[in-house]
Each structure stands twice: as structure tokens, then as C-alpha cells.
């Protein structure tokens, strides 16, 4: 059975580094680092979902970052 996959170029372009995600959110990179750390300690999901591609390679999906912002919208 063939499973359709996104083009790798498009999928990668939709991913943000922690610095890019922080800039889009208007927070510091440290805030995102703490979010991941606290979630790991508590065994809960982080406020902003991410993908760990390696020990030090973290990526955020643009749509997840925007969904995080939308969920906290007031008014």
C-alpha cells in the first residue's frame, strides 16, 4: 500500500528552529527551553508541541506555533 507523503522540501520549510518559533511567539528561546524541560519533568505535554530530531535538534511546526497563539487569543 502506497502512503502519500509530503514533499521533503515543503515539510522542512514548515518547520521552525527554536529561535524562529520564539521570534514568532514574541518570547525568548529560554522560555521555550523551560517549557520543554518542565513538561519533561512533569510528564505532561509542552505548551508548544515540538519535534526532537536529535539530542540538540528541536523543531516546531509553524501550524502548531500559530495554533498556540490562537488558543490564547482573548476577544
Image (cartoon, rainbow, N blue to C red):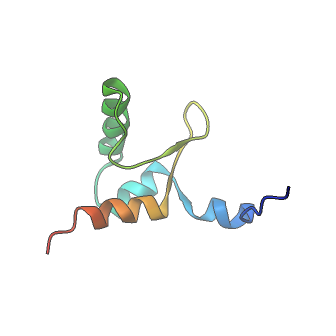
Expressed as whole percent of the image width and height from the top left, the position of residue 27 reads 28, 54
Expressed as whole percent of the image width and height from the top left, the position of residue 15 reads 56, 58
Q: Is residue 59 above or below residue 25?
A: above
Name the image quarter holding residue 6: bottom right
Q: Residue furthest left?
A: 75
Q: Residue furthest front?
A: 1
Quarter occupied by the C terminus: bottom left
At 37% across and 39% down in the image, what residue appears?
A: 45
Q: How many marks?
A: 0
At 57% across and 30% down in the image, what residue appears?
A: 55
Q: Residue furthest right?
A: 1
Expressed as whole percent of the image width and height from the top left, the position of residue 42 reads 30, 26
- Viewer-side residue, 10 vs 17: 10
Q: Residue furthest top?
A: 41
Left or right side of 32 for 51? right
Left or right side of 57 for 8? right
Left or right side of 21 for 26? left
Expressed as whole percent of the image width and height from the top left, the position of residue 72 reads 22, 62
Quarter occupied by the N terminus: bottom right
At 84% across and 58% down in the image, what residue appears?
A: 2
Q: Is residue 37 above or below residue 57?
A: above
At 65% across and 62% down in the image, what residue appears?
A: 11
Name the image quarter holding residue 39: top left
- Viewer-side residue, 72 vs 17: 72
Amino acid at each position: 500500500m502506497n502512503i502519500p507523503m509530503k514533499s521533503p522540501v515543503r515539510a522542512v520549510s514548515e518547520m521552525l528552529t527554536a529561535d524562529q518559533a520564539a521570534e514568532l511567539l514574541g518570547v525568548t528561546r529560554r522560555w521555550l527551553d523551560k517549557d520543554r524541560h518542565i513538561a519533561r519533568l512533569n510528564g505532561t505535554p509542552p505548551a508548544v508541541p515540538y519535534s526532537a530530531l536529535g539530542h540538540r535538534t528541536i523543531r516546531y511546526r509553524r501550524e502548531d506555533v500559530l495554533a498556540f497563539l490562537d488558543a490564547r487569543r482573548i476577544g
